[in-house]
Amino acid sequence: MAWLGLVAAAGAYLTGIIAARMLGAKVASFVGLAEVMFAVLFAWLLLGEMPAPVQLLGGALIVAGVAAVKADERDDELPQATYEVEPLPEA
């Protein structure tokens, strides 16, 4: 039983580190907040505990934050336009 727990914990930890590196620090920090949303979702589905409106609002704000951070990160990856100006001919 301890071996199974150790292997499962090590696998989850390792894949979490790999995913965090692939996502980047900003996005990974917001995606980490999704754990709380899934806990509320499972409590709702498995135990019948309906979330309060403030909890639903908090979940919506987390999803909006992840989308905003990802959109900001996408804008940073776009190449910046450079313009070359030719000198005026001498008269």
Image (spheres, rainbow, N blue to C red):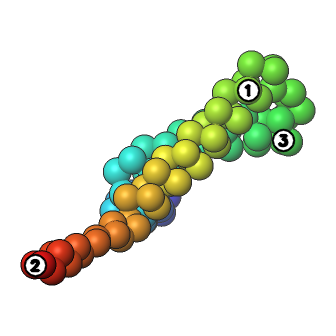
Q: Which mark is residue 87?
A: none
Q: Split into 4 quadrants, where in the image is the C terminus? A: bottom left
Write the residue at 38% across / 65% down.
77
What x and y, as percent, mark residue 15?
A: 42, 65
Q: Which residue is mark 1?
A: 57
Instruction: State whether residue 65 appears in this view.
Output: yes
**Residue 59 in the image: x percent, y percent?**
68, 34
Examine the rendered structure and indicate whether residue 45 appears above or below residue 2. Answer: above
Q: Residue at x 76, y 29 (%)?
A: 56
Verify CB contact (< 8 Å) between mark 3 and mark 2. Answer: no
**Tag nearer the camera, 3 or 2:** 2
Question: What's the residue type where badge 2 is placed?
Answer: Glu
Q: Residue 21 at what x, y percent from top left? A: 33, 62
Q: Residue at x 73, y 26 (%)?
A: 57
In terms of secondary structure, where does tag 2 sit?
A: loop
- For disc 3, the neighbor class at 10 Å (few under 14, some 14 to 19, many from 20) is few
SS state under label 1: helix
Query: Total number of numbered labels?
Result: 3
Mark sitting earlier along the chain (2/1): 1
Residue 35 in view in this figure: no
In this figure, which residue is indicated by the disc labeled 2?
A: 90
Q: Confirm or deny contact between disc 2 and disc 1 (CB under 8 A).
A: no
Residue 46 disc label: 3
Q: CA distance from mark 2 to mark 1?
A: 65 Å
Q: Quadrant of residue 17?
A: bottom left
Q: Around disc 2, counting alpha carbons within 10 Å, would you say few (fewer than 14), some (14 to 19), or many (20 or more)?
A: few
Nearer to me, 19 or 44: 19
